[in-house]
Image: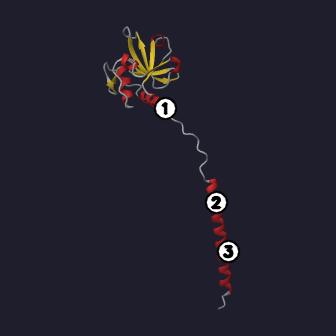
Amino acid sequence: MLLNPALAWATAAYIRRLIVCCACAAALVSSASLTLAAPDAAPVPVREPGTELAQLAEEYVGSAYRWGGTSPAGFDCTGFVMWVYSQFGIALPHNEAGQLASGDRVAADDLQPGDVLVFANTYRRGLSHVGIYVGNGLFVHAADERHGVVVSNLWDGYWGPRFVGASRALA
C-alpha cells in the first residue's frame, strides 16, 4: 500500500515533533529535579518558652490594675505573673516569696525573657512587687491602680535599688 506523499510528510513531521517533545520533557524532568530541589534548609529558629511567655505578658500592657486581681479583667502584680505563667501550664502562688521560690534562682547578669523578678520595699517593707523580665533590661508588671500593666526599666533609679532577685520557673 502506497502512502499519500502529503500524508507521509505530515506523519514524519508529527513523529519528529513527538520525539523533540519527549526529549524536551525528559530534559525538563531531569533538570527540574536538580534546580527545583529545595535548597539546603536554613535552621529554623527555636523559640524559647521564656520568650513566648514574655511576649504574652507584653500583650497585656495597658490592662487594668485591681488589688487581688488574677485575670485580664484586672491584675495585681503577683496575680499578673501567676496568670501569665498559668497560660503555659505552670501554677505559681499569689505572693512574692512563693514566686521567687518557684524556680531556680537567677543572677542579675543571667536574666532571660520570662524570668520572674522580685522587688522589696516598694509600697511596704520587705518583698512587695514582682514582674516578668522581657529582655534588654525591661520588665512588664502590674504597677498600680493609676498605671495598670506597664513596661519599666529594671535598672532605673526606682526599680534597680529595690531589685531583690529572680527565678526561672520555666525550665
Question: How far across and down, in percent of the image, does residue 136 sit?
Answer: 53, 22
Q: Do the residues labelled 1 and 2 touch (CB within 8 Å)?
A: no
Would you name the residue on which mark 2 appears?
30
Task: Estimate how packed mark 1 is, as few (under 14), some (14 to 19) or many (20 or more) residues with alpha carbons within 10 Å.
Answer: few
- Secondary structure of the residue carrying numbered label 2: helix
Disc on the earlier residue, 1 or 3 = 3
Q: In this view, does 144 lie above or below 40?
A: above
Three-letter amino acid code at the position of disc 2: Ser
Question: How far across and down, in percent of the image, does residue 42 sit?
Answer: 59, 41
Judged left or right of residue 81, residue 44 is right
Disc on the earlier residue, 3 or 2 = 3
Front disc: 3 or 2: 2
Disc on the earlier residue, 1 or 2 = 2
Would you name the residue on which mark 3 appears?
16
Depth order, front residue of 25/75 = 25
Query: Which image quadrant: the C terminus?
Result: top left
Three-letter amino acid code at the position of disc 1: Glu
How far apart are labels 1 and 2 at the CA level?
41 Å
- Secondary structure of the residue carrying numbered label 1: loop
- Residue drawn at x 44%, y 13% is 164
Front disc: 1 or 3: 1
- Secondary structure of the residue carrying numbered label 3: helix
- Residue drawn at x 38%, y 23% is 81
Q: Which residue lies furthest to the top in this view?
A: 125
Q: Which mark is residue 48?
A: 1
Question: How far across and down, in percent of the image, does residue 147 sit?
Answer: 39, 19
Q: In this view, does 75 lie above or below 25?
A: above
Query: Which image quadrant: the N terminus?
Result: bottom right
Q: Are marks 3 and 2 in contact (CB under 8 Å)?
A: no
Q: Residue 160 carries which label?
A: none
